[in-house]
Image: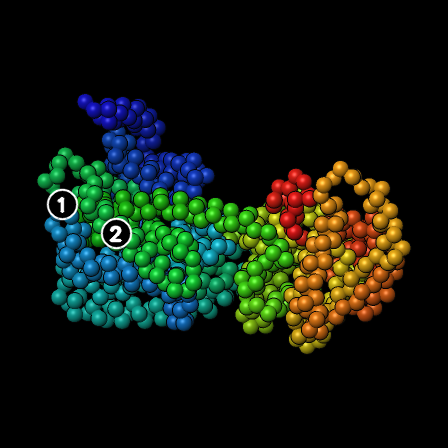
Amino acid sequence: MTTTQQGQIMFEQACMKVGILLSTSYESMASQIIFIILFGKLFHTALRRLYIPRLLSDMFVAIVIAKVQYIRVIFQVRLGLFFERFGNSMFSIYFFALGLEMDPFAVFDPPGKDGYIAYAGMISTLAITAICQKALVNNKVGLFAENSFRANLGLGTALAATGSPLLTRLITELKLSKTAAGQAAVRAGIFSDMIATSLMCIGNLIYHDDSMLSDSEQWKHPFYVAGIVAEIITLMVVSQWVLNKINEHNPEGRPIKGIYMTGLMVAVLFLCFLDKRLHMDVNLAGFMVGLALPREGRVSRVLINNLNFILNSAILPLYLVNVCFSIRHSELHMNPKVNLVINMPLLWPKLLISIAIGTVGKILGTVMTARFYGMKWLDAVALGQLLSIKGYYHIFCAYEAWNHLIINDTTFLALLCMIMLTSAITPLVGYGIAAWARRKARSQLMGLQFHKPGTELRIMMGLQGPQNLPIALTLVEAIRWTKESGNLTLYAIDMIELTERVAATLIKGEGSEAVEVTDKEVMDTRNQIGEALEAFQQESNDGIKVQRLLAISSFDDMDRDICICAEDVMAVLIIIPFHKSQRMDGSMDAGHVGFRQVNQKVLQHSPCSVGIMVDRGFGHTNQGSLSLVGKNIVVVFIGGWDDREALTVASHMSQHPAITLTVVRFLPDDVAGARDNVRSKMSHNPNQPFSSQEELQMQADDEFFTEFYKQHIANKEVGYVEKHVADGAELVMELRELESQYELFVVGKGRDRKSILTDGLDDWAECPELGPVGDVVASSEFSTTASALIIQQYDARKHYNVIDEEFMPF
């Protein structure tokens, strides 16, 4: 007896005890169903940290129940009746939810890059299916039990689809939704799923089973098809009006009345039953009905959330148990004592052929198209592997093909193993992409000064409410104007305090947001922000892409959410509002202590550069558009990392045709220079072989400013003023003289800047986190009309882990 056989005997003996316990404790059908659900939930929770898809955990539970004799005997008797009555139509709920999440009109739009990638992956899969046609009908290793056009087209179409629900959840959990491969995979996956499932529905209408229809029914079949088409068209017209009426009676912020949801589901079941009477498969009928309903609106969103919960908790685990309980149809010469398909030996040639068609075909077409659009080789291959993931839809297709004797038992088992294999490999690929993207982000200096021209510029904008929008959108509109071609993506993150009232209104979200807020006040605020951002994006003529994010937490943890989001989206600049607001009389109020704490922590822990915006009306006259009125902006340059970053921000603004930019460089006069020389001599160490940190900073400042002068000032693009001052008091006086001439001051925070020009300013600073100059321009005494943007550059010393600052690369 081999070690494997001994282990199997010991395992079955252990399961015998479990079976005895189950037989005494779980005698009713309902108890057995609950046990399956809890068993699957337990395994999914245990494997969740490994990013294992729910499909694998549910399939593992189903295989254990079907393969272990003692457990199978307990469940098969009572559940057999349940599966016999409801098993074949159980999957219609999944198809309905799948169709409800899709937009059928997207097919008629001109396909973009993602559409072409989806088409290419599907066509290459169908092409490989046609090329391997002889191998597919081979008696020994072939996949088909019948050699027909229906079998070849059905297999190719099914394998050309992507398990988009699994893929979307995987990309969300791995935080790949901001990477190029992740974004393309989600859109292309949904698109290919919609096309493949629609083709499957059309094939079901055309290639109906003639043996199941009488002569009169065959003659009437074209009329049945016409009836289904008429029903879908009518539903697409009527459903929008019906759902709008339901939304009117159930405003946002209030739970939807159960009578409406119940009535809607009854109507859906009736339409599926009607399609069944018209000789269409009830499961595919659910997809057609879901596709006809509009996906926008509150009712559809709530319906999708509730259906996904029911599907993941009960329907899909039970469906997989039903699949694993399948009794063999053919190939009785292979060990007749084996009754279930899942217990049959696996034929490896069939598994390899199915992998070659379903995976290699998908990757080949995807890589070729992605490379054509300029995607890197690694991203293109990763995208192909992500799109080759299989899901519940493919199990359904294999199960239905086996039921209709299109494939045999061993082929059915091979396809199940292929689906599980791709579901296990794809998370590893996704995890590799996530790790590579984060390593790439950490290998770059995430600041505007270090941003490569011509590449996508990513800016995160923190918003406390709609009052921050005018200045925020105006700043973004100004920064996006660059000579080098490159897109700007704005990530608008709503900063919401998590109070007890708000916490009570949180529900589980879908997509990029883990939670959704149903509090009426918060929803109204977010809706106002969303409408303004959408209008701003349309006015920018596709020059700016806007993405919404949410940081809903206590003030102690909000900075962590902001920094994590900035790292995930690989932003080079975070702009957040000042914690103080301007009163009607022009002075600044005391401010919000919580938001001040958040700003201080973001400045300390940010993975990129940070800007604090002090709003005194900048942008309020034109709601973010600079095309109608000019703006006078001044940049204060003293020296240091932060001032160089502020000058880089200003260099972007200078290229906007409606902006007049002036750079004011403050230099020490003779008195300040003499005092600085005395101070440096007193602190000089003759044994120190290298230049001091101040000398390195001054050298870097001169080199950077010289380059800026050549590019922007020499050609009269930017104005330039040079002022000599003796100390901080004279610096403040000069700034006050500039106050009436400019509408926005862009200044560096001056972190760790040791300049004689700012000596003494920190002693009476009200907000030290803004730096000496930033505190001056943000104070109520400075101005009532001039806004300010205080810039802190990404701390390069953290990036390089510098021990001795004299080796710091500038």
Instruction: Identify the residue under disc 2.
Output: 356
Instruction: Look at the numbered disc 1 and give the secondary structure of its residue.
Output: loop
Q: Which of marks 2 and 1 is in front?
A: 2
Using the image, determine if residue 592 lies above or below residue 49: below
Residue occupying image coordinates x 37% and y 54%: 381
- Answer whether labels 2 and 1 touch (C-beta < 8 Å): no
Residue sitting at x 68%, y 67%:
710
Position of 98 with respect to 694 (left or right) is left
Q: Can you say whether 83 is above or below 463 in the image?
A: above
- Mark 2 or mark 1: which comes first in sequence? 1
User: Which residue extends farthest left?
Assistant: 333
- Which residue is painted at 70% across and 54% down in the image? 700
Question: Is 362 displayed left or right of 479 in the figure?
Answer: left
Q: Identity of the amino acid at label 1?
A: Ser
Q: Is mark 2 on a helix, strand or loop?
A: helix
Q: Which colour scheme is used?
A: rainbow
Q: Which residue is drawn at 57% across and 63% down?
A: 453
Q: Name the residue under label 1.
A: 330
